[in-house]
Image (cartoon, coloured by chain):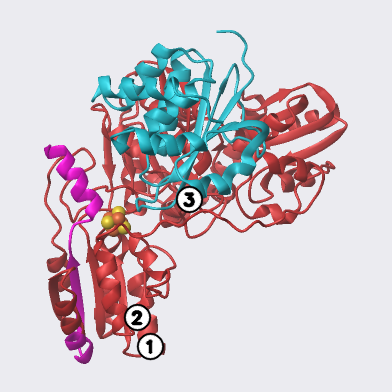
Chain colours: A cyan, B red
Amino acid sequence: MTDLKTVNILFCGTGGQGVLSAAEICGWAALYDGYHVKKSEVHGMAQRGGSVESHLRFGTLVYSPLIPKGEADFLLSFHPDEQARLVKYLKPSGKDLLPYLQQAETTVPDKKFINTYLLGALAKSLPIKEESWLQALALVFAGKRTAENKEVFLAGRNSHDLE
Amino acid sequence: MKQVFLSGDEALAQGVYEEGLKVACSYPGTPATEIVEYLSRLPEVDAQWSVNEKVAFEVALASSIAGLRSMFSAKHVGLNVAMDSLMTAAYTGVGAGFVVVSADDPGMHSSQNEQDNRLLARIAKIPLLEPSSPSEAREFAKQAFQISEEFDLPVLIRITTRLAHTKENMEIAARKEIPQKEFKINIPKYVMVPGNAYKKHLELEQKLVRLKAYAEKSSLNRIELNDRKIGIIADSVAYLYAKEMYPSASFLKLGFVYPFPADKIKEFASQVQELYVIEELEPFIEEEVQRLGITAKAKHPSFRVGELRPELIPLIIEGKEKIEEPSTARKPVLCPGCQHQAVFSVLKKLDLTVTGDIGCYTLGALAPLNSLHTCLCMGSGITFFEGFRKGVGKNVVGVIGDSTFVHSGISGLINLAYNGTKGVILILDNGTTAMTGSQPHPGTGETSKGQKNRKLILEDICRAAGADNVDVINAYKAEELETLLRKRLAEDALSVVITRAKCVILLKREQKKHD
Ligand code: SF4
């Protein structure tokens, strides 16, 4: 692992959409590659439908658990309203991955794997090895439907650049 | 050493586990819940959900006095419930190490207030440790037992929601088994009658002097000299926010916060040009620095409300006022098919004033239901009902959940019967502690470790408490519920109506287990 300035990824959506597991997978993938990782989210209310955001940061050394406003390198949204609400966190040169959400919704057969597809799209721009991603996916999905997961992840990863 | 990715709650639990923790007691409450959930999975630890925090605290403290390393954990307002016990525990001291964890909720992500429990360390006169990150939560937890045993005091570890729910990768170590301490009868130490307590208070004051000296030397308080133009004193997660925004500044990072390491603060102040205090919520450190006669810039009072964020730090440094931004986040709503929806629709139809309590059903206050009219703290659905019967009259009902009823509703019900109050209390029984993620409670008969013990029958305890009528009804039968409520409201009797239907999230979870 070479020295890496902190990479900031903001995941957002509403409760039950898989936002938290997407961030969890990304966190483990970065961890497998040897980075220092912090992932911060607020959860606790059992009920559904509330806004959910997860801040994932990794690099050589990460301080704040939260991404400072205007410093996010990537915004990965599971809901257009949440994207609109949080786009202010993105830095001017940051990547908004919202276009991939639409693509995922039309091309991914099982809604359960939308987060996997979005992670594939995100993976294009991250210094994380493919095997680390796959290992993290298998871990968080508890080894279930591994082949399908890999397929969807690679579809996201090999998709045309939209942002 | 194994690499793991743990939240602040889990890392703290892992830390005490490695140090030979034997007994852990708590009542579920965000953001502290995951501490005991984590420990419940570890066979060496006797971890329990207790009936409420006062019970939890005393069981844990007594286990410590009886010779076992123990821990009590709760959310900030949960510690209030155990305050009576905590205050005198500082006098009795402990046996084996005893750690008290307060998980505060700056920003009130899921709480009824945002009290700053750092202040309680000063009131109770016990040492206060504040980790900044999950890896520190583990390390600080490991030190806490030693401090507790060396000073014969409970040690308060204060974390916040942000830390509790941040995950970080770290290495963990194997557990050490710590031999049990022998309990010896010691009446002057453990029987707090005035004469004994007086001597223990004298002793406590001496301990505080020794603790201050300890804090001065503790590795948990660290001076990081860098650019000396800006010197920042910070604790908890505020330290990380400040470090993020001002990486080249000098820092005094406080981890052993109370008793304050006054000499270290003075030493740091003398080494930097401009001194700042950065802390979340109350001006706890700020006031201490002032007391020492040191000039430091601190946050505008407007920052005493709400959670800090990294981008707010420059505003604090510049002495600016906080600009309140209304939250744009979507609020959670009741799950589709939740029983509370059905029950509150009936209460709305009957146009009742409803004294409420803490749980998912507090959402009954939101539009379009607008059918829950008070919510103060655990148990207040019943006690508020009694006050409202006095002032508002008969068109009132009290509502409370099953877990909340067991936590602190029972004494309110006894009070109603004892004082001759009539009317209707509803227990919304969904068979779990739903809001914190479905923990079992005495009414389910299952323990935190999944053991099936004796089940508390709500009907029986309501009758024993003095209710004249106890009805159990399927929560989804709206018409039947309406008829029943009309009947009970018209009677001159104390009635409890238990609306029963399992939380749909719990049902789903149970189905998944079966699949
Ligand atoms: S978690 Fe259970 S009790 Fe809470 S809103 Fe959902 S269904 Fe209702």
Q: Name the residue under label 3.
A: B76
Quarter of the N terminus of chain B within the rendering: top left
**Chain holding disc 2:** B
State the CA–CA distance, disc 3 to disc 2. 27 Å
Give the mark count: 3
Secondary structure found at label 3 = helix
Q: Position of residue A106 (x, y in %)?
A: 37, 37
**Chain holding disc 3:** B
Residue B512: in magenta span: yes
- Quarter location, residue A157: top left
Q: Mark 1 points at which residue?
A: B390
Residue at the location (18% across, 70% down)?
B498
Residue A48: in magenta span: no
Q: Are marks 3 and 2 on the same chain?
A: yes
Q: Where is residue B492 in the image (x, y as percent from the top left)?
A: 20, 91
The magenta segment is B486-515
Can residue B61 be seen?
yes
Residue type beneath disc 3: His
B399 vs A48, nearest the viewer: A48
Residue type beneath disc 1: Lys
